[in-house]
Every structure is written in C-alpha cells, then in structure tokens.
Amino acid sequence: MSEGAIAWMLVATALVLLMTPALGFFYGGLVRSKNVLNTLMMSFGAVSVVGLAWALLGYSLAFSAGWPLVGGLSHALLRGVDLEASGAIPHVLFMAFQGTFAVITAALISGALVERMRFGPYLAFLGLWAIAIYAPIAHWIWGGGWLADLGALDFAGGTVVHINAGIAAVVAALVLGRRRDYGRQAILPHNIPFVLLGAMLLWLGWFGFNAGSALGANEIAGLAFANTMLAPMATALVWMILDLVRSGKATAVGLATAIVVGLVAITPAAGFVSPLSAIVLGALAAFPSYFALLWRARTRLDDSLDVFAAHGVGGLTGALLTGVFAQESWNGVANGLLFGNPLQLLIQAVAVLAVVAYSAAGTFLILRAIALVTSLRVADAAERAGLDVTEHGEQAYTSGEGAVLLLPLSRTGEVTARPGPVVEKVGGSA
C-alpha cells in the first residue's frame, strides 16, 4: 500500500460524499419554496439509506467474485472488508469510496420525483434500487462482469452512474405522473443562488469523483483532474452561446446546468482522453443536452429538474465519445475511433444499450412493487400545501417570530406568555 495513495483517496472519498448534499442545494434551488426542505431531504436521506444498503449488501453484489451479471455474497455484512490491500489502499477504504458513488447515483433520480412523492416510499425505493439496479450494473463495468470482459470503458461512471440514473428518472417520472400544476402554471426556481452554489460544490466534489477513480495518487489521477477542470468550461461556453443565439440572454440556471452536463460527459472519459480531447468532448456535449432540455419542456413528461437531459443524455454522449477520443498513448488501455479502433465505439454502444434496458425495466418493477403496498404520491391537498410541511412538519422560510403562546394562569393569577409557533386557547379565549 502507498501512504500517498491512501491520503488522496481519503480526500477523494470525502469530496464525493460532499456531492450528495451539494446536489440537494442544486435541486433545492430549482423547486418552489414550499418544497425546498423535502428536496434537500431527498438527497440527505439517500446518504443514510443507500450508504447502509451498500455496506451491508450492495458492495458484495458489485465487487465480490461471482457471475457475469452479479457478484456473490462473500462480502455481505462487510465480511472480509478489512485493512488488507485493495490495490494501493485498504480494502475498507475502497468500499467506502465506491459507496459514495452509489449514494450520489440514487440521489440523482430525486430530481424527477420532487414536489409529489411521499418520503417513506421514496426511501424504500432508493434502498431497493441501490441493491437491485446499481450494484449489478457496477459489477458489469467495474467488478469484473460481462461488460468489463467485453472491453467497455467507463472511467468514473458515465454508464454506471449517469445513464443509469437518467433512465431511472424518466421511468420514475412516468410511473409517478405529473405534478398537478405542471403545464397549467409557471413553476419557477425559488432560489437561483442555491442552484449556482450547488453546481460549484458539485464541481469541487467531482474532482474526487473522477480523479479519485484512478484509485491512487498517480499520473492518471492528474489527467482525470485536468480533464474534469477543462471539459465543463467548454460546455459552459457553448451553452451560453446557444442561450444568447436563441433568446439573447445567458441565464444563470442554464450556466449551472451546463457545468453539470460537462462534468457528466467527461466522467466516463476522464482517464482515457487527452486534455485537448476533453475540451472538444465538453463542447460537443452541450448540444444534445441543450436541445433535449428544450424538447422535454414541450412534452407532457414531468422530469421535474431535467435529470434525463443532463445526466441521461450527457452520460450517453460522454460514453459514446469515449469510444471516439480514447487514446492509448495517454491511458495505456485502448484507442478509440479517431485513433484507429472503431470497434471501441461499438463496444461503448453495447454498454449503453444494456444499461438503458436493465435500468428501465428494473426501476419500473421496483416502483410497481412498492405501489402494491402503499401510495407513491402525496394527496392533492398535501401537494398544494407543499411537502415541507406535510412530509416533514417544517418550513424552510418563516416570517416574524411566530404567534404568542398563552400558558395557564400563574399562581399570582396572571397569564404568562412566551413566543411560540402556535396559539393555545386558555379559558375559551386565545
């Protein structure tokens, strides 16, 4: 083991864990104020539910020796996950690092479910999805499964994370149905500074996400770090130009979305392409996601926060372009189409199609199974009132100091009072 590698992977694991609450702020700023706490809770709740599901079972299914489609149970309940080396780092640290990926992937789906899904069924869905959908796909690519044997390239999660979550988001939005106000009134972001804050914290965490996927403090980590910096810059520039050409205004929400799209697109390619290719890849990735977002807004699909346009389409673009721009002289693994290996692009397409099919079918079955037991959606009255109050009993924003709470008579016969959130009737008067 290497002390330098351990130090870097400790930092990288913390950075990736930061991404999930950062996602909560990114999503939270995009919803209405009456639902911001619920949206944040969808990300924070994922940390707990998915993190534990990963440690107890998901990690074993993803990374234990087993079959081409799923791993075994040799590491269930963290058996054998100890201080022995896994590459250059302790096995337990490798498990923790991979667990942060499972958490953020599941949390991404929440952007298609906000403002209408009950919190309890949502948590149940995340736990089941992490075990039944995420873990097997992670095994296919990273755990020695059939796509790894085929030669599919996914450095840090274009297929495992982003296409997987993007497709699951579309299916979940269709199963859950539209928000009651969707298409009937403008549903505007309530706090755009939150969106920008979340985007920049996501970018910070993404350095751990991509550069950490080198699993050491080495040259490939440096390459992935540089590419993670450059690609979103190119995506953001092209996106702002597209905004200016289309409407004459470059929007802050558009810029934040573009940064995320660039990060998504470079994720599968981060350790496989040159920095110049990363810039080109980032620039190209702006186009399909930008127009997918515009198209979705004209449909009846209520993918509330455009998870599919940003993560599904961005991940698909990045996964396929990895098969175009991969360069063995930089990564020591494989060339892509531009460097004499057109077969790599075909392999990438097979990986994309496999993940799309499995994620779509599995997500649908999990949601339908939960719906047999309990309702997925809140009642119409709860949706009108907002999920912060109806699901959590709290409000993100209040005005004043609350009502005056009148207490029973004191021994002296005087009525005592203190500030409080409710008014208690005493002797028939408030």
Image: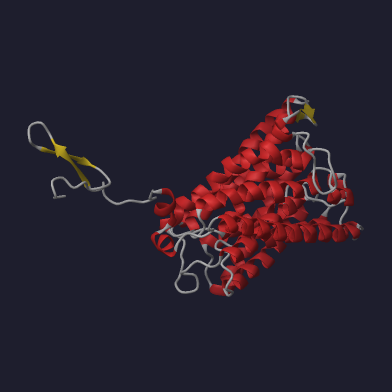
Query: In which quarter of the view is residue 99 placed?
Result: top right
Q: Residue at x 73, y 51 (%)?
A: 160
Query: In which quarter of the view is residue 18 placed?
Result: top right
In this rendering, would 313 be left or right of 17?
Answer: right
Q: Position of residue 404 (x, y in %)?
A: 20, 45
Query: In which quarter of the view is residue 306 placed?
Result: bottom right
In this rendering, would 389 be left or right of 137?
Answer: left
Q: Position of residue 28 (x, y in %)?
A: 49, 54
Q: Is 11 or 224 nearer to us in this picture?
A: 11
Query: Is residue 234 shown to the viewer in this render?
Result: no
Q: Is residue 44 above or below residue 237?
A: above
Q: Residue at x 78, y 59 (%)?
A: 352
Q: Is 85 or 126 nearer to us in this picture?
A: 126
Q: Is 45 or 72 nearer to us in this picture?
A: 72
Query: Is residue 423 shown to the viewer in this render?
Result: yes
Residue placed farthest to the front in the image? Answer: 373
Q: Position of residue 202 (x, y in %)?
A: 59, 48
